Image (spheres, rainbow, N blue to C red):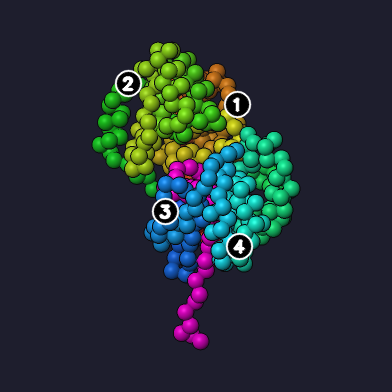
Amino acid sequence: MDNEVKQKTKVTHVSKFAKPHKGGIESFIEMFNSCIKNDNCDIEVLCCSNSDKPSNENGVFFNRAKYFFEFAANTFSTDFIYKLHKVNTDVIVYHMPFIFAVIAHFIARPKYNKMIVCYHSDIIGYDKIMRPFWKIYNNFLEQADIIHVQSPQMLENSMIKNFKIKAVVIPYLIDSNSHFDTNTVKEIREKYKNKKILFAIGRHVRYKGFEYLLEAMKSVENSVLLLGGTGPLSKNFKEYILKNNLQDKIKLLGRVADIELGNYYEACDFFVLPSIMQSETFAVVQLEAMKHSKPVINTNLGTGVNYVSIHNETGLTVEPKNSEELANAINKLLNDDNLRNQYGYTARQRVNNLFEINKIKKLYMELVNV
């Protein structure tokens, strides 16, 4: 009996998309897997993709299903239902919101021993369209053994407050080691000599609120905003910058490679997150900035965003969609070196104390009992 090989625990994630697709949930799945990956665990990710085939990557099997179309932030796929029906796993981890996966769950009836729902966000912006599905969504959540949320704010301010008895709060985590190239950081700073550097990054979509940040920059002097990312609003941003003669104050970086991100976090004086909707539930980019000892300006969304960076402790918080407040907060940090340093130091300590990978990793392992 002593020589028996311990049977591996199989964990299956179910998500709309996964790598190489970029996004908060996709990044979280990678983080989750990095915590539970070991010799006693088999990991599978069932997701949708029309551009990538199923593959094994770094010990994780990505089972990608073809889909017909996207509508209301959902992919629709009979292939997904078929593959979910074939799932036979120890732990199934659904990543919400993804209503089609909820419908597929009741049709496909996958086999599992434990069901975890990682509840990343309420359904934002599609309330009327999704109204017919609320009952089935509630039934789905009732079937879960555990509902994982990433902040106390999510537990109190989302529909999960109705399921507190089975909810577990475990924050997203981060490797607290800062990775950057000293020479590249020096080059960035010298390029904008005599100016303070603000950094912001994310998809150029409405809920990120970047248009309010661009407007705020009209009331800011002796600084430059480096805005990374791309998206459907990128063209609008370019036109706004030209129309308002902001070319010296705002630089659109386009897509920033992961390997380069640390250089911009290190080079900037502080980070700005101007999001305007509660679909911004956590924003790991704040942690990225904070581990580089940078203060954060964020918005008062009542989500995990305000759990990560605390007003008057690790930075400043302003009301969403308020360019004047945003400009005032920017100017306050620009004009007070001691305050920036104080917030930056506290930000780094908060990362070390609450979000560092070695402190949180074991909680994710316990979640799936690996």
| Distance from Cα at disc 4 to Cα at disc 3 | 22 Å
Q: Can you see residue 360?
A: no
Amino acid at pointer 1: Glu
Amino acid at pointer 3: Lys
Label 4 with label 3: CB-CB less than 8 Å: no
| Distance from Cα at disc 1 to Cα at disc 2 | 30 Å
Q: Position of residue 28 (x, y in %)?
A: 50, 49
Q: Is 118 placed left or right of 294 in the picture? A: right
Name above or below for residue 274 compared with residue 139.
above
Q: Position of residue 94 (x, y in %)?
A: 59, 54
| Lower position in the chain sequence, tag 4 or tag 2 | 4
The tag on residue 194 is 2
Which of the pair 90/194 is nearer the observer?
Answer: 90
Which of the pair 149/309 is nearer the observer?
Answer: 149
SS class, disc 2: loop
The tag on residue 110 is 4
Label 4 with label 1: CB-CB less than 8 Å: no
The tag on residue 53 is 3
Which of the pair 207/307 is nearer the observer?
Answer: 207
Amino acid at pointer 2: Asn
Amino acid at pointer 4: Pro
| Lower position in the chain sequence, tag 1 or tag 2 | 2
Q: Crowdedness of circle 1 by 10 Å Cα count: few (<14), some, many (20+)?
A: some
Pick out the residue farthest to the top.
244
Q: Position of residue 332 (x, y in %)?
A: 49, 22
Magenta stretch: residue 137 in it?
A: no
Name above or below for residue 180 compared with residue 210.
below
- Tag 1 residue: 319
Q: Residue at x 50, y 53 (%)?
A: 65
**Which residues are drawn in magenta?**
1-27
